[in-house]
Image (cartoon, rainbow, N blue to C red):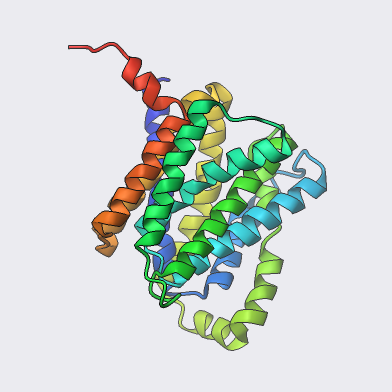
Amino acid sequence: MPVPHIALAVLIAAIWGFNFVVIRLGLDAFPPLLFNGLRFVVASLPFLLFFRSPGVPWRWVIGVGLVLGVMKFSLLFLAMAWGMPAGLASVVMQAQALFSVAFAAVLLGERPRRMQWFGLSIAAFGLIVIAGDMDGTSAFSGGLVAFVTLIAAAACWGLANIMTRRTAAPNPLAFMIWVSAVPPLPMFGLSWIFEGPEAIAAAFAGIELRGVAAVLYIGLLSTTACFAGWSLLLRQHNASLVAPFTLLVPVFGLLSAWAVLDEMPSSIKLGGAALILLGLLVNAGLLRRLLQQPARL
């Protein structure tokens, strides 16, 4: 890959990693379900005029919009609202790779190779290590309920990955814009029912620049702009070259959460996070390739 494309891939990974810090800050301004609806309004409405059609059957647009936009992101926002640390969330969400492989095996008949099973086993053990160190006494202190909610979000992400593959959208950016148009109405309805009109009114009455910036960052930069750049990279390079850059997302997530939020997970949680990243490296075949590279002086 040319250096500018490598720089773009790293920049996108950094934006996606910092995204978890922005979510944490945005949840101080908006209830989670309302916050999720607002981000998708910003990610979709300004661009629908430029993309008149998603290029795929509407059932796929609605299906991915509900699974990815409504379910996955609502569960992620709820888990973080209930106390899941931003940096740790950026790592645990990578469990989507395990669910993607599992769903591909069940729904598409794709059988993982032996090394993939080995890598996924390592990552799964890392999740177990983190779960064992969670405080299960309260859902609102980063406890076990928040952790399980985050795992459910990762499962929804994995299912959405398989659905997106099945669509084979000719224009991935147009598809994502229209997918982003699905969640707002359901999210605002769910927010009205579960968070209440008083909480919604209070959020808008006390709105601050930080809350607006969080919505714009997640909606415009992290969703629309980064997906446009990612689609550009995938059009010009093999997925095997581009996809491994996503492994930098939890690295940037942990570093930015430490720098901005002063989050420092326990050594056990950091060990579990390291096992997840190691498992993902093995699953992607990157560790084997790195070890097989000849040494250069």
* Residue 238 percent across, percent down from the top left: 54, 22
* Residue 201 sits in quarter: bottom right
Residue 257, located in which quarter of the rendered image? Answer: bottom left
Residue farthest along the bottom direction in this orientation: 198
Q: Quadrant of the N terminus?
A: top left
Residue at image x 70%, y 50%? 64
State the residue lying farthest toward the left: 297
Report if residue 48 is visible in the image.
Answer: no
Give the percent coordinates (x, y) of residue 73.
Answer: 57, 59
Give the quarter of the image for residue 248.
top left
Q: Position of residue 98 (x, y in %)?
A: 54, 43
Placement of 94 over or under 189, stated as above or below: above
Residue at position x 49%, y 59% in the image? 216
Residue 32 horizontal/vertical position (percent): 53, 71
Q: In screen coordinates, is 45 left or right of 203?
A: right
Say which quadrant the C terminus sits in.
top left
- For the image, the number of numbered tags is 0
The residue shown at (24%, 13%) is 295
Q: Is residue 150 visible?
A: yes
